[in-house]
Image: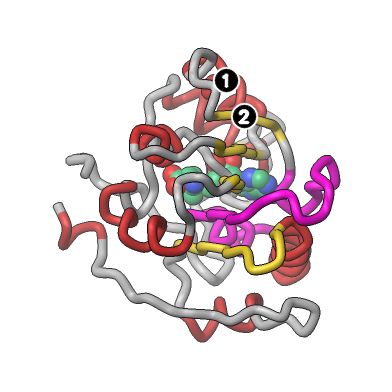
């Protein structure tokens, strides 16, 4: 577990963390430019939001065996995928809307064949055919979308895309700070015939 403090978390209201764009507009968690600027500022330093893999491992291993083909949505600069490869996972396709972080991660992991990095919007992953993955993992990306404009529409688009990409019997692991009462309606869309299992974890601060 990292000893640094976690960054402010995306929230369910419109109180997104904001930085200034070059044209004077405010940017927030829901916008690609915000993330590009943030990843430039961080200079390639790795950061895992909410939890590191070691804390999540029991859940991930339970729902996705190492032979699974995994889709990591909104991978950021997290060490999660690297840690999963160290733990035996053989194929993790990482996507993120930030071209800055995707370029950084490609360079960092050019010699790790188990990891692939693609710049893509989670709301439109049409590059992948239906039923491409055994498991999709999101740690903090739906939370970010919930801070953007048209949040309910973005969330619906993301969930439908994840549903389309999962093989029959596949699993979506959503790691979120959102209250279940706010997140469940997104998961319970009528188009998705999902069985939802909820685990409430202790907070980051209590684990360090
Ligand atoms: C809170 S960070 C989480 C990063 C990483 N999953 C982690 O656990 O540390 C949210 C990530 O989602 C990405 N993101 C935001 N909107 C996105 C979108 N529409 N499509 C794909 N990625 C997006 C951001 O660039 C950022 O890397």
> What is the span of residues highlighted in magenta in the rendered image?
121-149
At 64% from the left and 68% from the top, the residue drawn is 169
Q: On the picture, is 126 further left or further right than 93?
A: right
Callout 1 secondary element: helix
Q: Quadrant of residue 160?
A: bottom right
At 74% from the left and 56% from the top, the residue drawn is 165
Magenta-drawn stretch contains 150: no
Residue 46 placement (x, y as % from top left): 38, 30
Callout 2 secondary element: strand
Residue 185 placement (x, y as % from top left): 63, 83
Mark 2 to mark 1 CA distance (whole Å): 6 Å
Binning the other alpha carbons within 10 Å of mark 2 as few (below 14), some (14 to 19) or many (20 upward) gives many
Q: Which mark sits nearer the N-terminus, 2 or 1? A: 1
Q: Quadrant of residue 164?
A: bottom right
Binning the other alpha carbons within 10 Å of mark 1 as few (below 14), some (14 to 19) or many (20 upward) gives some
Q: How is the image coloured?
A: secondary structure
Q: Is residue 34 above or below residue 107?
A: below
* Residue 90 visible in the picture: yes
At 73% from the left and 39% from the top, the residue drawn is 120
At 56% from the left and 28% from the top, the residue drawn is 101
* Numbered mark located on residue 106 in the image: 1
- Residue indicated by mark 2: 117
Q: Are marks 2 and 1 in contact (CB under 8 Å)?
A: yes
Residue 159 placement (x, y as % from top left): 70, 65
Magenta-drawn stretch contains 140: yes
């Amino acid at each position: 577990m990292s000893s640094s403090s976690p960054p402010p978390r995306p929230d369910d209201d419109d109180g997104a963390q904001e930085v200034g764009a070059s044209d004077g507009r405010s940017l927030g968690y829901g916008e690609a430019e915000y993330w590009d600027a943030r990843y430039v500022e961080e200079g390639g330093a790795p950061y895992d939001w909410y939890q590191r893999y070691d804390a999540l491992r029991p859940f991930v291993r339970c729902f996705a065996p190492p032979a699974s083909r995994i889709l990591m949505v909104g991978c950021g600069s997290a060490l999660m995928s690297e840690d999963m490869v160290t733990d035996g996972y053989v194929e993790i396709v990482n996507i993120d809307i930030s071209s800055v972080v995707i370029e950084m991660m490609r360079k960092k992991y050019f010699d790790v064949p188990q990891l692939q990095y693609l710049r893509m919007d989670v709301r439109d992953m049409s590059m992948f055919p239906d039923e491409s993955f055994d498991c999709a993992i999101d740690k903090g990306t739906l939370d970010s979308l919930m801070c953007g404009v048209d949040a309910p529409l973005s969330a619906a688009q993301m969930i439908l895309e994840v549903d389309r990409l999962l093989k029959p019997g596949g699993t979506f692991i959503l790691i979120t700070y959102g209250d279940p009462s706010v997140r469940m309606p997104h998961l319970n869309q009528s188009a998705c015939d999902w069985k939802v299992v909820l685990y409430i974890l202790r907070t980051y601060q209590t684990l360090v």
